[in-house]
Image: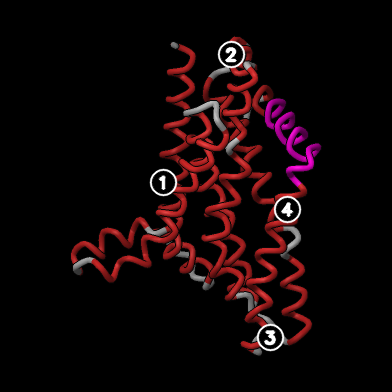
């Protein structure tokens, strides 16, 4: 990351964490994940975080777009986007900075959830492999959803529209596996590759498969590239 990109990323992070929206989002995420986690944790009577990780794709489909929707849309709305384009920075640097800020902001959602690990460990010995794999998979999933949210935000000056575009794409990738039973076997094998939940579940079990890593890296790279292209078009326009 270049010096200019680091400065822009730092500015975005400061703007996010200095606003009440950041802490409202963090609290809502903690409440939602906590309710869903503890509602079954004591019933399962096992020291594990499987239930928490199983709901992450659904939660992140909502919360990551909520965090990233402002990254470009807000600047376009208030008119500072045009000023940004006149600075001596490239579209790649702009997108890199916005992506880094969006990813770190979204990843901060997981910090309070470490309490779940402590809670589980206090009730018995937990298997470190699935826990490490779960958080690693969560970071890859967050990166993919951040790039999708970033691209959606680059398309419009309306944050609500940006949110729903990103939410629709993220939700589709998260829920596609739930509809595989409706398709014949040849189609299932193809559609299953596009399921973010399936790839995340594999990593969260502590199984590091290059196909799963390739999936998340590919999704992140594709939407990152589309965002760069969108910004380049904005410069020409």
Which one is earlier in the sequence, the residue at label 1 or at label 2? 2
Q: Do the residues bearing badges 1 and 2 touch, measured as CB atoms within 8 Å?
A: no
Secondary structure under the numbered disc 2 in the rendered image: helix
Secondary structure under the numbered disc 3 in the rendered image: helix
Q: Is residue 77 left or right of residue 112?
A: left
- Closer to the eye: label 1 or 4: 4
Residue 58 visible to the viewer: yes
What residue is shown at x 58% (from left), y 21% (from top)? Answer: 76
Q: Quadrant of residue 182?
A: bottom left
What residue is shown at x 59% (from left), y 48% (from top)? Answer: 64
Which one is earlier in the sequence, the residue at label 1 or at label 4? 4
- CA gap between label 1 and label 2 equals 30 Å
Residue pointed to by mark 3:
42
Q: At which x and y percent is residue 3? A: 68, 24
Comparing 82 with 9, the one in front is 82
Q: Residues within 10 Å of mark 1 (few under 14, many from 20)?
A: few
Q: Is residue 10 magenta?
A: yes
- CA gap between label 4 and label 3 equals 24 Å
Q: Quadrant of residue 187?
A: bottom left
Rendered position, 176 above or below 164: below
Q: At which x and y percent is residue 31? A: 71, 63
The part of the chain drawn in magenta is 6-22
Which one is earlier in the sequence, the residue at label 3 or at label 1? 3
Residue pointed to by mark 1:
218
Q: Do the residues bearing badges 2 and 4 touch, measured as CB atoms within 8 Å?
A: no
Task: Say which quadrant the C terminus sits in.
Answer: top left
């Amino acid at each position: 990351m270049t010096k200019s990109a680091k400065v822009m990323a730092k500015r975005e992070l400061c703007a996010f964490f200095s606003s009440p929206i950041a802490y409202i989002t963090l609290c809502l995420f903690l409440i939602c994940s906590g309710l869903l986690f503890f509602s079954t944790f004591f019933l399962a009577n096992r020291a594990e975080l499987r239930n928490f990780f199983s709901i992450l794709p659904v939660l992140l489909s909502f919360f990551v777009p909520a965090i990233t929707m402002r990254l470009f849309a807000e600047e376009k709305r208030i008119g500072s986007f045009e000023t940004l384009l006149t600075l001596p920075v490239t579209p790649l640097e702009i997108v890199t900075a916005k992506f880094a800020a969006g990813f770190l902001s979204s990843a901060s959602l997981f910090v309070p959830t470490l309490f779940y690990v402590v809670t589980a460990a206090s009730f018995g010995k937990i298997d470190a492999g699935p826990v490490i794999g779960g958080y690693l998979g969560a970071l890859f999933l967050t990166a993919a959803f951040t790039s999708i949210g970033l691209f959606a935000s680059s398309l419009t000056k309306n944050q609500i529209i940006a949110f729903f575009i990103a939410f629709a794409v993220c939700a589709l990738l998260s829920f596609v596996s739930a509809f595989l039973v409706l398709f014949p076997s040849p189609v299932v094998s193809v559609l299953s590759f596009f399921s973010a939940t399936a790839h995340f579940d594999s990593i969260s079990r502590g199984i590091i498969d290059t196909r799963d890593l390739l999936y998340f890296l590919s999704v992140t790279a594709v939407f990152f590239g589309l965002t760069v292209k969108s910004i380049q078009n904005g410069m020409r326009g």
